Image (cartoon, helix red, strand yellow):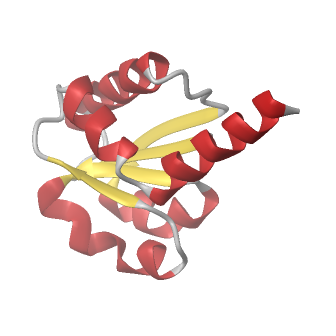
Amino acid sequence: MKILVSCANGSGTSLMMMQSVKKAMNELAIPITKIHHCSIAEGKSSASQYDIVFTPINFIAMFTQAKERGIPVIGIKNVMSPKEIGEKFKETTLYITMKEREKSNDKT
């Protein structure tokens, strides 16, 4: 899965959130093929290249175009919480679809 983590300046907060995202995905056994952290300005223009976007909750509105293209955009309240990230990710259709495919592959 290709993951984008984006915040205001793309340095401190997004780097910390990226570590939390990695931990959450590892706990959920979700393979990451690419993960990138960046500023909102860069994130808005590159979001379509990713499967999912994580951003602090107050920046969700900045990713309207990504949402319109079907890319899940997850707003996080506590960027240091792998638990919150994992819980919100499990609510996405992307996660549900991945788990359904996994189950059908196990049956074959």
Q: What percent of the width, then of the height, locates residue 99?
A: 59, 40
Query: Would you place residue 81 above or below residue 67 in this image?
Result: above
* Total marks placed: 0
Q: What percent of the width, then of the height, locates residue 31?
A: 62, 27
* Residue lying farthest to the right in this orientation: 108
* Residue lying farthest to the front in this orientation: 107
Name the residue: 24% across, 65% down: 60
Query: Looking at the rendering, in which quadrant would you find the N terminus?
Result: top right
Foreground pick, 35 / 45:
35
Report which quarter residue 98 is drawn in.
top right
Foreground pick, 78 / 108:
108
Q: Does residue 5 appear left or right of residue 12 in this picture?
A: right
Foreground pick, 108 / 41:
108
Name the residue: 32% across, 33% down: 86
Query: Looking at the rendering, in which quadrant would you find the C terminus?
Result: top right
Report which quarter residue 69 is drawn in.
bottom right
Q: What percent of the width, then of the height, locates residue 30?
A: 56, 28
Foreground pick, 6 / 11:
6
Q: Does residue 13 appear left or right of residue 33 in this picture?
A: left
Q: Does residue 59 appear left or right of residue 97 in this picture?
A: left
Q: Does residue 87 appear left or right of residue 52 in this picture?
A: left
Query: Would you place residue 89 above or below residue 65 in this image?
Result: above
Q: What percent of the width, then of the height, locates residue 90?
A: 38, 43
Name the residue: 42% across, 67% down: 44
